[in-house]
């Protein structure tokens, strides 16, 4: 219990510190980018995010909560959840790519096709990080989680600012959206030191899917 108390306090401090750092990074980066880019550049990315933001609700499919709340979870169960998340990520990415021409047609801007296709990669990398992030939460490694999230945000912001200085316009914002999940996924994988096993059909998987589906439906309604 003493160890639990210490981990809880350290985790709370880490989360609050990460929140403050993230707010500062976002504020500074947006102020800088607002000076370097045109308002229309933000609008182009915003039009795509309006669509991908809905799909992003499904990337976890509630399975991170499944992995965290279970008293015990085997490596086989965690691996099965990982592959389900990857399947969901692939489906979401393909849906985004398929929707690219329709999004461009809706907004009457052909540039949105390429932007949507590139941003689809972010959904895939987000899904690849779900179970590794859940594993770190189960182990109460909140300091590591917070550090990775801040680094991912800082690096993506730095790349976006560098791209804006280089004159690539709205692609700087696209890079910011895509780089963050890539760095976060890599950080989670390295820190968790866990490689999923091969996909297998397991008993009880349907109940876990039902639990995750309920959480996802709740998130969708709230959204």
Image (tube, rainbow, N blue to C red):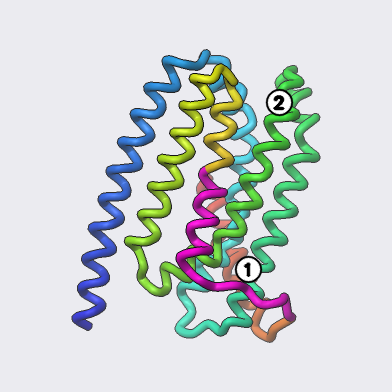
Q: Pinpoint residue 19: horizontal percent, then vertical percent.
A: 31, 47
Mark 2, Cα crowd under 10 Å, few <14 / some 14-19 / many 20+, is: many
Residue 163 as seen in the image, left or right of residue 27? right
- Discs 1, 2 touching: Cβ within 8 Å: no
Mark 1, Cα crowd under 10 Å, few <14 / some 14-19 / many 20+, is: many
Q: Which residue is mark 2?
A: 112
Q: Earlier in the sequence, mark 1 or mark 2?
A: 1
Q: Pinpoint residue 27: horizontal percent, then vertical percent.
A: 35, 30
Q: Residue at x 74, y 53 (%)?
A: 91
Task: Give the magenta range.
Answer: 180-200
Disc 1 versus disc 2: distance between alpha carbons? 31 Å
Q: Which residue is mark 1?
A: 82
Q: Quadrant of the N terminus?
A: bottom left
- Of 196 and 11, which appears nearest the observer? 196
**What secondary structure is marked by label 2?**
helix
Count of all numbered marks drawn on residues in the image: 2
Q: Is residue 154 above or below residue 48?
A: below
User: Residue 139 in magenta?
Assistant: no
Q: Is residue 164 above or below residue 93?
A: above
Residue 204 sits in quarter: bottom right
Magenta residues, dominant SS class:
helix
**What secondary structure is marked by label 1?**
helix
Q: Residue at x 59, y 20 (%)?
A: 168
User: Residue 185 in magenta?
Assistant: yes
Q: Residue at x 64, y 31 (%)?
A: 48
Q: Pinpoint residue 53: horizontal percent, then vertical percent.
A: 58, 41
Q: Residue at x 61, y 80 (%)?
A: 77
Q: Is residue 6 above or below residue 25?
A: below
Residue 26 as seen in the image, left or right of residue 114? left
Residue 167 sits in quarter: top right
């Amino acid at each position: 219990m003493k160890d639990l108390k210490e981990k809880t306090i350290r985790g709370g401090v880490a989360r609050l510190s990460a929140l403050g750092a993230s707010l500062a990074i976002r504020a500074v980066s947006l102020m800088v980018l607002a000076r370097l880019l045109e308002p229309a550049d933000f609008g182009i990315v915003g039009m795509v995010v309006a669509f991908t933001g809905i799909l992003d609700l499904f990337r976890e499919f509630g399975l991170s909560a499944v992995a965290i709340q279970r008293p015990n979870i085997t490596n086989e169960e965690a691996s099965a959840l990982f592959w389900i998340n990857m399947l969901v990520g692939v489906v979401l990415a393909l849906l985004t790519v398929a929707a690219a021409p329709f999004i461009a047609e809706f907004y009457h801007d052909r540039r949105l096709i390429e932007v949507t296709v590139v941003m689809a990669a972010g959904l895939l990398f987000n899904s690849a990080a779900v179970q590794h992030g859940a594993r770190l939460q189960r182990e109460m490694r909140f300091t590591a989680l917070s550090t990775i999230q801040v680094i991912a945000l800082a690096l993506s912001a730095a790349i976006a600012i560098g791209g804006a200085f280089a004159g690539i316009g709205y692609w700087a914002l696209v890079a910011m959206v895509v780089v963050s999940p890539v760095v976060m996924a890599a950080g989670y994988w390295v820190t968790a030191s866990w490689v999923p096993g091969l996909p297998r059909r397991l008993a009880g998987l349907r109940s876990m899917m039902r639990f995750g589906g309920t959480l996802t439906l709740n998130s969708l309604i709230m959204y």
